[in-house]
Amino acid sequence: MKNSFLLAMTFAASLAAGCAYAGECLTNAMGQVVCSNTAEGGAAINRAGQVVTGDGDCITNNLGKVVCSKAPGGGAAMNRMGKVLTGPGECVTDYMGQVMCASEPGGGANIDTTGKAVCAGGCVPGR
């Protein structure tokens, strides 16, 4: 009974914070929780401590600027030069420092034992 009550209170608090059915949520420099507006959306904190959200994954680059994938459920990764590149699915950085992304929206990607990218539906270079 106690666990049900705590679960209900946690859900109510997330609704009050505007985070129901949202993607990633982060706390900004003021202590406020900010969530992305889509279930697949991402979030990252910029140099000023503000939460920036997007339709897909978000990453803070080496200059403190947040870059988000415009594709719902899309990925983002940083290349060897510190530039954030995005794609339709999850993105990874391979052994050469190149960003490779799953060609399928929301598709997964990983690095194999040789350092090469393996992606759902095949890999495409990040843009």
Image (spheres, rainbow, N blue to C red):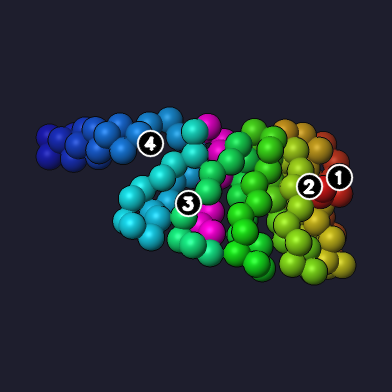
What percent of the width, then of the height, locates residue 62?
Answer: 66, 68
The residue identified by callout 1 is 124
The CA span between labels 3 and 4 is 14 Å
Disc nearer the start of the sequence (3/1): 3
- The residue that appears at 44% across and 41% down in the rendered structure is 35
Report whether 6 appears left or right of 11: left
Residue pictured at 74% horizontal, 67% vertical:
82
* 5 on left or right of 82: left
Residue 46 sits in quarter? bottom right
Q: Using a 10 Å C-alpha cutoff, classify the residue at mark 4 as few (fewer than 14 neighbours), some (14 to 19) or many (20 or more).
A: many
SS of the residue at dot 3?
strand
Residue 86 included in the magenta stretch of the image: no
Tag 3 near tag 2, CB within 8 Å? no
Q: Amino acid at mark 3?
A: Val
The residue that disc 3 covers is: 51
Q: Is residue 83 above or below residue 104?
A: below
- When asked about the image quadrant of residue 66, the answer is bottom right
| Image x and y of residue 111, in percent | 76, 58
> Can you say whether 19 is above or below 66 in the image?
above
Give the mark toward the camera: 3 or 4. 3
Q: Which quarter of the image is occupied by the N terminus?
A: top left
Magenta stretch, residue numbers: 38-46
Q: Is residue 54 visible?
A: yes
Q: Determine crowd level at label 3: few under 14, some 14-19, many 20+ residues with C-alpha closer than 10 A.
A: many
Q: Marks 4 and 1, how far apart in space?
A: 32 Å
Disc 3 from disc 1: Cα separation: 28 Å
Return the disc, 3 or 2, that comes first in the chain's sequence: 3
